[in-house]
Amino acid sequence: MEERRAVHLDHAPVNDAAYLDEATLLVAARERPGTGRRDGGVAAFSALTGDLRHRFRVAHDRHVRSYTPGALAFDSRCKVFASCKGRFNEYGIGVWDCTTGEQADFFYEPPGCALGDADKLQWLDGTSTLMAATMFPRTDSSFISLLDFRDKKNVAWSWSDVGTPASLEDKHVLHAIAMEDGRSLCVINQYDDLGFLDVRSSGGAGGVRWRSRSKLAARKKKAGPRGEETCYPKLAAHGGQLFASTNDTISVFSGPDHVLTSTLRGSDAGAICDFSIGGDRLFALHNEENVVDVWETSPPPII
């Protein structure tokens, strides 16, 4: 693989990055306190040259404000979304036109719905809604919402683990994705259990349907050196398959019953902190610096 020119936004720490298309890279960088400047924010760069194309500003009451973005997402109509935290409690989801870089909307955080801290955003084409998930340990409780940006902006569906029965209260949702069928969400907890939420039921009635998969973890989790970054489980859905990273392994599930069909384990470079699927390749980033594993993705098996 060819390494391309590195990009940065005021040398601020990066919270998220995503390819808008093969020629455009989006970067979300957090504001550095005490600088007195409007650094950080969201920007679009040329993926080939690294040149800055657009800087996405946030305005409230027609005044441009500094903000710290968290997670990124985009839809098929060239709208870019980012969870935003402003200096004056201006929390919510910012929306921009990816062609012009102009702000198109802002979904302010309603009571009991932690949008500004959301660490996972995903656009759902089937329902034209945006999934916003704020999860443990960023907050003490986990919140997942589906946001409708049409006419009257509203929360179309939401779920939280606040008030969970005592028998389940120690299970914290660490990551979430919307399944490709658009009817359910998949979540994973600190015990590497997979769970499913039906978004067709009001307010997540019935709660999470947990499926224990601890027996699938072939290796015990090893404690890393003191001060080493903690890597939490991550999920992805692609080509009808479900992918879950736990420790140094990525498990692949297929079919309507999500049967475990393969396990990927690469470099002995510590836990997998993040992974992404692009085209026919899967990329896994380890917590050991500068170690990335790459797999060619195979077509889903016939179940």
Image: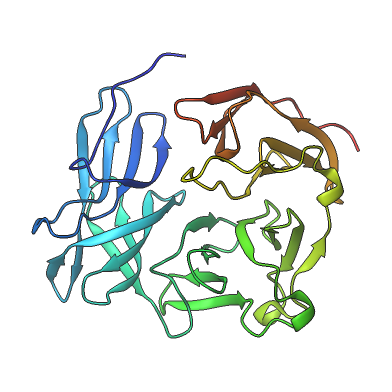
Q: Is residue 197 left or right of residue 63?
A: right
Q: Is residue 86 above or below residue 167?
A: above
Q: Residue at x 46, y 45 (%)?
A: 227
Q: Looking at this view, name the residue that lies furthest to the right.
A: 303
Give the percent coordinates (x, y) of residue 302. 89, 33
Q: Reply above or below: 14 against 150.
A: above
Q: Position of residue 193 (x, y in %)?
A: 76, 57
Q: x, y percentage for residue 291? A: 51, 25
Color encoding of the figure: rainbow
Figure quadrant of residue 125:
bottom right
Give the residue drawn at x 38%, y 17%: 3
Q: Is residue 263 left or right of residue 41?
A: right
Of the pair 151 and 300, the residue shown nearer to us: 300
**Which image quarter: residue 124?**
bottom right
- Residue farthest top in this picture: 2
Residue 179 visible to an observer of this rendering: yes
Residue 81 at least partly seen: no
The residue at 25%/28% (across/down) is: 50
Towards the viewer: 265 or 85:
265
Q: Is residue 277 left or right of residue 48?
A: right
Residue lying at the far left of the rendered structure = 36
- In the displayed structure, 116 sits above or below 39; it is below
- In the rendered image, residue 53, in percent from the top left (x then y), is placed at 21, 37
